[in-house]
Image (cartoon, rainbow, N blue to C red):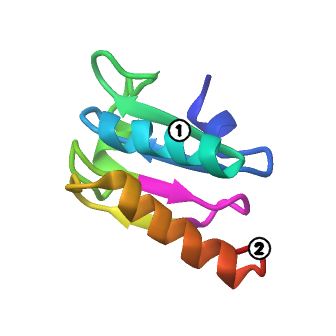
């Protein structure tokens, strides 16, 4: 899967860096529990979902190797965590509570 396909298609996308597996696990759990259309992937080098061969992601991501971005279905960044979180599930739950309430879906 290409990064472009991850962020298209009318769903949310959580993109984490190389060491962002806790963000991916939290996003997947939240999506299942709440029925949210959400794709997630780790991008970088090594054992990741999407390999960043040219290091373009690493140069432009504006987050650490433990951080993550949440992209709205319209392609805009809804949330950015520059680093790891103690409880990524709680953080993402709060983010989605705000996003979905703002859209009248909460």
Q: Earlier in the sequence, mark 1 or mark 2?
A: 1
Which residue is label 1 attached to?
28
Q: Quadrant of residue 6?
A: top right
| Quadrant the N terminus occupies | top right
Q: Which residues are magenta?
A: 69-77
Q: Secondary structure at mark 1?
A: helix
Q: Residue furthest front?
A: 33
Q: Nearer the viewer, residue 46 or 21?
A: 21
Q: Residue at x 48, y 33 (%)?
A: 41
Q: Quadrant of the C terminus?
A: bottom right
Q: Residue furthest top?
A: 47
Expressed as whole percent of the image width and height from the top left, the position of residue 77 reads 53, 65
Q: Is residue 79 left or right of residue 20?
A: right
Which image quadrant is residue 43 in?
A: top left
Residue beneath label 2, please?
105
Q: Tell me, for residue 71, which label it has, or none.
A: none
């Amino acid at each position: 899967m290409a990064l472009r396909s991850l962020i298209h298609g009318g769903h949310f996308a959580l993109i984490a860096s190389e060491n962002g597996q806790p963000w991916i696990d939290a996003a997947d759990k939240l999506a299942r529990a709440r029925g949210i259309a959400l794709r997630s992937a780790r991008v970088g080098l090594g054992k990741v979902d999407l390999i960043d061969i040219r290091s373009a992601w690493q140069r432009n991501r504006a987050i650490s190797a433990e951080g993550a971005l949440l992209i709205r279905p319209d392609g805009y960044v809804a949330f950015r965590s520059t680093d790891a979180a103690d409880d990524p599930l709680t953080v993402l739950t709060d983010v989605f509570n705000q996003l979905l309430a703002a859209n009248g879906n909460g």
